[in-house]
Amino acid sequence: MSRPATTPTSAAHDRDLRWRGPLAGRYPAAAAMVMSALIPYLALSAAIGPITPIIAHGLHMSLQEMSLASGMGNAAYAVGTVLAVQFAQLLHQRRMMVLYVGLLVVGSVLEAAAQDPAMFITGHVLQGLCTSLLLIAAVPPLALGFGIISVACVLAIPREQIDDRSARGLRTLGKSQDSASGLSVLFKRRALLALAATLAIFSLGNGAMLSMYSLAVVQAKQANPAAFVAASVVISQGTMVFASLLAMRIIGRHGYWPVILVSMLVLPVRAAIAPFLIKSWGVVPMQILDGITSGLQTVAVPGLVARILNGTGRINVGQGVVLTVQGIGGALSPAVGGWIAEWRGFGVSFLALGGCGIISTVLWITFASTVRRTRAWAKQSRPLRSQEARCE
């Protein structure tokens, strides 16, 4: 049998397939390349909200232009998804991944060194485009590798160590077992409704506090934007760690109710001192107080929801409902704070945001007896676990 004729094009293609680079076929190398390129960008993208006013002021851009840049970046992300699929069928992916990483670096440099709105928008669009290109190009190795690792980790957990019913908050008393309650139980627990309403009002005031304060400091030309942003993140996160540890000790002795009360009292204090701290050093006390709030609520809120819904089998659903209501308040906060600042200035905006903290505090005190009754109900439902921390 005669061999088929070899054309110059097929010969070049065969040579290209035979050549394998040092990273070819290595999942760790592919995963490391993608994560090294994307993790810093994704982390900074998540933190861009509080520093948007600072970026806009530095580039003399309006908030509408910043919104336009964000929208164009999202559009580029969508386009990149389609292009990545097409490129995957026609071109060699390891070479394309190197190209995608290079373009992402170029976009990041353009955005970081932007001197005008056009340069900033160009860099942001390149970042959005290359993010989706990298994600799609890395799907096969990442999906396979992460799937194998996840299965191995799950199989390493002893089956007898997992109590599915306890994880859902169901009671097991002797040989009798309760079934999960209907979703209506979420509306029958007055303590849960009080917690959700209180957190929604609190988030309405707390959500925009950092953004309004940052914008006030930058407009007053009292701080270096880069140093201000770095300090606001580091101080808040560092304080939150210590506050979380302290919250666990307080809960063990006094219950959940006073911890959440203290976290809400912090907001009016921040609002009261903010107009007098429009200085570069003012970020220190402001963000220490913010870290205290975050640390206390991070520990207390999930624990209290679990205690309120203990025995119903709806703990996870309850957590989602509370977070959703809290998120609605936080989403509305920038709009409310920005409108008041434009209408009456930053001082009035701070007072209005702090007023939400006062209202939430009053509401929480009003429902104190309702929340504390959760302690007695929990002891009746879990008689074998009476040594658990009190819920107050």
Image (tube, grey):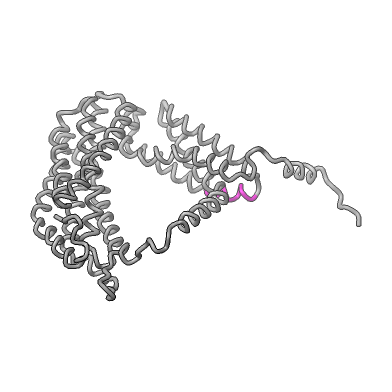
Asked where in the image residue 177 lies, by quadrant, the reply is bottom left
Q: Residue at x 21, y 65 (%)?
A: 384
Determine the residue located farthest toward the bottom in the rendered image.
176
Count the labels in the image.
Answer: 0
Quadrant in the picture for the C terminus:
bottom left
Q: Nearer the viewer, residue 357 or 318?
A: 318
Question: Is residue 338 visible in this depiction of the protein?
Answer: no
Q: Is residue 222 above or below residue 323?
A: above
At a point 30% along the width and 62% down the height, the residue shown is: 317
Residue visible at 20% across and 46% down in the picture? 249
Give x and y (percent) for residue 265.
13, 43
Q: Is residue 42 left or right of residue 175?
A: right
Q: Is there any visible trace of residue 86 in the rendered image?
A: yes
Task: Between residue 124 and residue 166, name the one nearer to us.
Answer: 166
The quarter of the picture where the N terminus appears is: bottom right
Q: Is residue 202 magenta?
A: no
Q: Which residues are magenta?
A: 81-89
**Measuring 50% from the left and 55% from the top, which residue is drawn there?**
152
Q: Residue furthest right?
A: 1
Q: Which is more toward the observer, 131 or 237?
A: 237
Dividing the picture into quarters, in which one does residue 306 lie? bottom left
Tell me: residue 181, above or below residue 288. Answer: below
The quadrant holding residue 58 is top left
Is the stretch drawn in magenta largely helix, strand or loop? helix
Place of residue 203 in the rendered image (x, y in percent of width and height, measured from the top left) = 22, 47
**Where in the figure is residue 280, as x and y percent of width and height?**
24, 25
Image x and y of residue 184, in percent: 23, 69
